Structures are given as structure tokens and as C-alpha cells.
Image: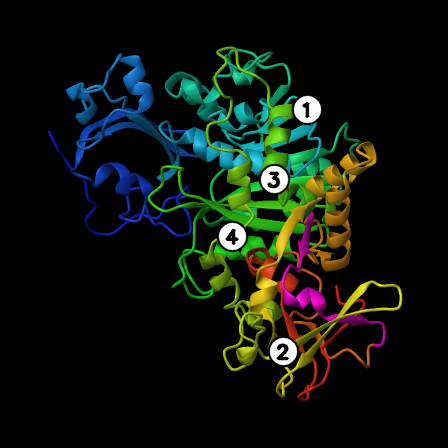
Amino acid sequence: ISWSHELRGFRHNEPYVSATKTNYLDSNSDLAIFIMSPLDLKVKKEIIVTTSEHYRIDIWEILGHDDIPSYVDGMKHNLVKGDPRWMTADIVEPTRILFMNGALQCMTSHEREFHESLVHPAMFAHSNPVHVAVIGGGEGAAIREVLKHNTVQTVTMIEMDSQIVEIAREFLPSLSDCSDIVGAADNCFDDSRVNLIREDAKTWFLDRFGSNSNKVVDNYFDVILLDTLEPQDNLDLYHNEQFLNALMNSLSTEGTIGVHLGDTHTIHDPKADKSNSTKERNRFMVALENHEETGTMFVYDEAHTGFEIPSSFLTVCKSTKKCMENWFAEAQATDYQISARILETNSKKPNLINFDGATQLLYQIPPRAWEEVYCRREPKPFECDFRSLDPTKALFEVDIKNEDDSDFQIELMEDDHGDQISSVYAKKDIPKGSYIMATELASSFTIGRNAHDALKSTVQFQQNANVIKDFLKYIDDSGHESLSEGRSLTYVEIGASALIRKSSDTKEANIGRWMPNKSRPVYSPVYDRHTTSLDVFLVATRDIKEGEEIVKPENLW
């Protein structure tokens, strides 16, 4: 039997309903969208519906008519190639979904992707997380992911609703199942490292880390994970200045925070503080951004969490340089950290199914929609003017194959010591602000710090590695480190731009960086998306006459 439920008439304001919804069955609620309204579900089964002291809790089991078996379903039922059951929903394991106050919290079919995306970016942004706090997360999946790190000694979980913990144990047992993690208890809540505190998180943090607290604490937290309702659904917690101060006070020197922000932006969204669906989230992010203890913060999206729209997450760091080094690590460096830190499984299966070095590499570049909304701020952040080349400015390029079409003339000669030197001259007038050899500069290659250091070590132990020595000298002569603090990249020019002479006389130099020499703000999707162009492009700093030599300043980078 297919059925659908829709509310009619007026809604009653209920104390546990969020600021953006008027009823847990309102047409905008997740419970209505995923369960009550759809008619295309083969299975729509109520598992438990109850009201605790703080939440209305709904767990439903669903299965779509068009669902087909997963790999796990196929293994469980010994399906082989050609088996017709691959094309039906007959053996598909139904998905259980947890709702709190009508808001979707997790679904068993995608919960690992969701919780890996929430937990591990913040965990690996810290070099050695020992003490971790989880706010909310009563279903147990967040602490399960935390306990996979061999550095963790204590996990303090503050969940004000003890009933959700017991309900999750009974009806969502896979979420708190730690039996496959080597050295962990069968149930994550029973692990000796976990301290479950049944108390309001705001009260608990203010009591211990608030400005008026006199309590002596045993440990500061290296990582704090907010696995509770989204910012727009929990105004009392996310928009309490004293709580945010206590949260930052509770962090260790290099502490990090991981937060689920909700649905991602689209490029058509208005200013974040003007949209009813995002203004409370924006208010929370701006409060963190402006907090004196915040070093840097990053936003990222994950599309595999089971929600209809990709989920957005935020990692906040108390320190700047070290966190940025970890965040912007090369994929292989992150993979190495995963292999060194993540505990093995008893089944010998991979302990992570979604997060790896390549995934973190994607998280380093926030989606364009976040950049678009960021640049709608008033006043507009200065870096928003550098998201693309200015079409009103001319491009002056070099063409080695066809000198007649080239805007520059290159002269090679030898100095008194027999070393080759070069000079580059303008073949036409170049107005101030014009782009200089943009194509050549965009061809620069990058080398990471780990690879660079490895080559240096090779030269030390291999006396005949002349080719590597020459390569390293070229990197020193034609390369420069990224100007973004924490990024371990060196950009190496390989085109004609590397032949431009450098001068220590700033009056002689006539080209300079496209991007003004300003430090990266605490939060900037623009910097994170456009680091390469901000790090390599050059412009004319004054009008350059035909026949005049092109000269870089010695301290350009």
C-alpha cells in the first residue's frame, strides 16, 4: 500500500521546532520530505516514534521501488553475474533514518560517508589529537570514527538527551558498533576511552571553561565535534557568545572544531545574511570568523551523505600555520597519515570507506557557490576582485616559434664568467596593469615540500646525482614558495618568464605581483580556490615603453 500524509490548515508552534520550520510535519521538514509525502516508496515502516525531554525522535525504515542491491547486498545473498535479482529491490537492505524534531540526522545507508566527512578532516587538521569532545552525536557514529585514531586517549561525549543514546543502541546498532576496530569495545559507548556525560553542552562548557569558571580542568580538547542539530535549528547553542568563548577556551593550542553546516549554497543564493535558510548559519560562521582565538577556518562539501543536496561542513582551527600545513597536505601525505594513525580492523577490511588523501584534496578547494555568496558581502572582500583576469586589461605574451607575433624580444648572452644571462625587452608599449606572459606563468609546475626534501636527501647520499643537482638548482633559481601560509608548494617557472632579469633596485623594476601583498583572511573561499593564480600572475606596475627591458624586483615573492 502506498500512502502519503500532508498537513492542512494552521500549524501549532511547538517548543522543539526550529526557527525555520513551524511543525515537525511541515512541508519543509525533512520528515515530511523523506517519509510522509513520497508515494514512490516500496517500504515505509515506522520503527519508533517518541518524545523525549528535549526532542521528538522518529526512526523510519524505507526502501524505494527503484532501489537496486548494493555490493554488500550482493555479497550477503551470493549474487553472481547475470542474476536477475541485481535489477530488483527484493533483496535490498532497507535504510533506517533518524529524525530529531523533524530534521534528518542520519541514514544507515550513507551514515559512514557523512560521519567520516564530519570527523576526519578536523581530526587530521590536528597533528596529534589525544583528547576529543563530541557535542551531541547520541547515535554513536561520531565517537566510532574518533576511536579509529590510535592517538586518541579520551573521548568526552556531552549529550543532554540520554534517551536518544538508548534508542540508537536498540534501533540503530550499526552506528555505535566498534567491534571491528582493533582494541575497541564491541559497542563504542562501552569503550574505556569514552566518557558519556548526560548534560546540556552549553551549561557543561560554561561551567568549566566560561569566563567566570574557577574549576581546574584535567585536559584541554585537541578536537571538538559538533554533531548536533544544524546552526539554523539550534539557535540557543550556536548563537550564544558565552558558549562560543567557552568552546574556544577549551581548545588546546592547536585545537580544531568540526561542524556540520547543513545543505550547501547554490550560485544563485542571495547574501547569506539575507536568506531565511542561511542567515543563522552565516551568523554563526561570522562569529567564529571574528573570534580572536580563531586562526583559520575552511568550508567544504560532501555529495555522498545521502541528502538530496550536498552537505557542507566547517573545520575551524585555533592555530594558523600548522593547521594549514595539515589541511593543504598533498594527497600522498594524508594517505601516509591515515595509514600511520587509523587502527586496523579485525576483519582486515578498510576502516575508512570515503575519506582518503584524494578526498581531502577535494576538500581543499571549496565549491564555487561558497565563493559567490562570500563575495556578496558588504563591503566586498578585496580578494573578490582577483577571481579572474580583468578583461579590460591587455595580455602581452611571448611567442618563441613566431617572433613576429611575440610581444617580447629575448636576448641570450654570456657574462664574464661564461655563465648564460638573459634579457627580455618589450616590442611594443605596455600600459600599466597589463598582464605579462600569463600563459607562460600559468604553465609553471609545482613541487611539494616532501618531494623537494626527498630530492635534496637523494643528492646527499648519491654523489653522482648530477641531473638531480641541476634540477634542484633550477628550482632555486626559477621557483618561489606559495604565498599562502601553510601551503607546502613551490611554483617553478618553466617558460620565458624565467628569463626576465631580477633587480634589487625597486625603481628599475617595472613588473610585479598581480595580487597585492595582503595576508589571507581567517576565512576566504577565494584564496582557497584561486591560490595558483594569486601565486603566479604578474602585471606591469607602470607604463613600459617599446624597447624597454622587462625587470622583476629581487624580492618579488
Q: Residue at x 78, y 40 (%)?
A: 456
What residue is shown with label 3?
202
Q: Are marks 3 and 1 in contact (CB under 8 Å)?
A: no
Expressed as whole percent of the image width and height from the top left, the position of residue 27 reads 26, 48
Q: Are marks 2 and 1 in contact (CB under 8 Å)?
A: no
410 within the magenta span: no
What residue is shown with label 1?
151
Start-end of magenta stretch: 488-505
498 within the magenta span: yes
Q: Residue at x 31, y 47 (%)?
A: 12
Q: Closer to the observer: label 2 or label 1?
A: 2
Expressed as whole percent of the image width and height from the top left, the position of residue 408 reads 63, 78
Expressed as whole percent of the image width and height from the top left, the position of residue 230 reads 47, 44
As helix, strand or loop, the secondary structure at mark 1 comes to loop
Look at the image and tell me in which quarter the N terminus lies. top left
The amino acid type of the residue labelled 1 equals Thr
> Can residue 255 be seen from the camera position used here?
yes
* Spatial separation of the CA atoms under disc 3 and disc 1: 27 Å
Say if 185 sits above or below 172 in the image.
above
